[in-house]
Image (cartoon, rainbow, N blue to C red):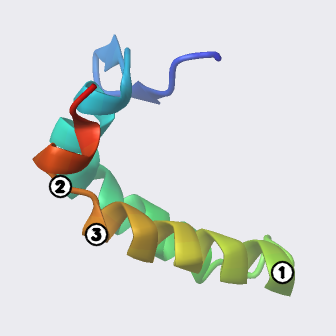
Amino acid sequence: MMPLKKGPEPITDLLDFYDRWPSLRGSMTALSEDDSLSEDERETLSWLILLADRVGPADLRD
């Protein structure tokens, strides 16, 4: 999977994504309200945001 770019370094794994989620959330929320996405895409992204909000450290253990 191609790493997501956010800031100077790409996101490298799920733990890194979890650590950065607070800084990513605002832009993802704005994108989920953007009319350039279809209604289905906006709804899917909104559900993914809710899912990411509920992930915690215990969920990331191997």
| Vertical arrangement, residue 18 with respect to residue 32, above or below | above
Determine whether, in the image, residue 31 is placed left or right of residue 42: left
Query: Disc 2 and disc 1: Cα gap in Å?
Result: 27 Å
Q: Which circle, 3 or 1, is nearer the viewer?
A: 3
Query: Disc 3 and disc 1: Cα gap in Å?
Result: 22 Å
The first of marks 3 and 1 along the sequence is 1
Q: Determine which quarter of the picture holds residue 51.
A: bottom left
Amino acid carrying label 2: it is Gly
Residue that sits furthest to the front in the current view:
62
Circle 3 packing at 10 Å, graded few (<14), some (14-19), many (20+), is few
Label 3 with label 1: CB-CB less than 8 Å: no
Which residue does the image show at 65% across and 77% down from the upper left? 34
Give the x, y percent position of residue 32. 59, 75
Give the x, y percent position of residue 22. 19, 56
Q: Determine which quarter of the picture holds residue 36.
A: bottom right
Give the x, y percent position of residue 35. 75, 81
- Residue labelled with disc 2: 56
- Residue labelled with disc 3: 54
Q: Nearer the viewer, residue 31 or 53?
A: 53
Which residue does the image show at 69% across and 83% down from the upper left? 43
Q: Determine which quarter of the picture holds residue 46.
A: bottom right
- Residue labelled with disc 1: 40
Amino acid carrying label 1: it is Asp
Amino acid carrying label 3: it is Arg
Dot 3 falls on a residue whose secondary structure is helix
| Image quarter in which the N terminus is found | top right
Give the x, y percent position of residue 53. 29, 68
| Vertical arrangement, residue 18 with respect to residue 4, above or below | below
| Vertical arrangement, residue 54 with respect to residue 4, above or below | below
Dot 2 falls on a residue whose secondary structure is loop
